[in-house]
Amino acid sequence: MSKPKVLCVDDEQRVLNGLALHLRRKYNLKTATSGAEGLKLIAEDGPFAVIISDMRMPQMNGAAFLAKVVEVSPDSVRMMLTGYSDIDAAIAAINHGQIFRFLTKPCPPDVLLKSVQAAVRQYELVTGERLLLEKTLRGSINLLIEILGMTNPAAFGRAMRIKNHVHKLARAME
């Protein structure tokens, strides 16, 4: 089984090194030193189960970064790890970044590990639930197709021709 993917974004390399020290054994860890670099990693190497961001970074703060993450990787579980625990930062992160946990620096390793583990479980629940719903929907559709085929073969034939036309049209439209 492959390790869950975790992305850590912080403008301080020593913080990223410390996170890597604690997380690299259990997780497939990637790091970025800016929000823009983090978004690039998500586009190239995503999806990530967990994304951890600092709040105060140049150009793009953590709340703005995590708000963009919601758009490009909505299933990723987002966490804030910051040395600045003012109420405005917490409100921005929660409202715009829809974060799972708000941790303050320095964060004890056991708290960090438990929080990331809980975030990975949350990611697995969300993605597992969607997969189950997709399989249930496909199974229901296939059952209805079989019933239609048995009860009204002529309608079934027309439905299959329409389905083939829709598939060709969808491929042509990309």
Image: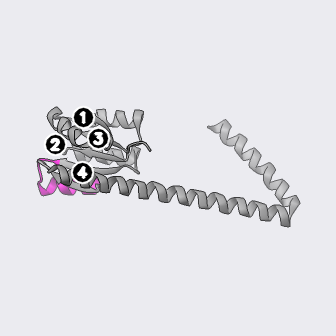
Q: CA distance from mark 3 to mark 1?
A: 24 Å
Do the residues under discs 3 and 4 have CB atoms within 8 angstroms? no
Amino acid type, residue under disc 4 in the picture: Leu
Label 2 vs 3, first from the N-terminus: 3
Place of residue 136 in the rendered image (x, y in percent of width and height, measured from the top left): 60, 61
Label 4 vs 2, first from the N-terminus: 2
- Mark 2 is surrounded, within 10 Å at the Cα level, by few (under 14), some (14 to 19) or many (20 or more) other residues, namely some
Residue denoted by label 1:
34
Above or below: residue 42 compared with residue 132: above
Residue denoted by label 3:
25
Q: Quadrant of the N terminus?
A: top left
Label 1 vs 4, first from the N-terminus: 1
Q: Is residue 91 magenta?
A: yes
Kindly state the secondary structure of the residue where label 1 is placed: loop
Instruction: Return the mark for residue 113.
Output: 4
Kindly state the secondary structure of the residue where label 3 is placed: loop
Give the number of the mark in front: 3 or 4: 3
Place of residue 110 in the rendered image (x, y in percent of width and height, measured from the top left): 19, 53
Q: Residue at x 72, y 63 (%)?
A: 143
Amino acid type, residue under disc 1 in the picture: Ser
Label 2 vs 1, first from the N-terminus: 1
Q: CA distance from mark 4 to mark 2?
A: 22 Å
Residue denoted by label 2:
56
Residue stretch rendered in magenta on the structure = 82-98
Give the number of the mark in front: 4 or 2: 4
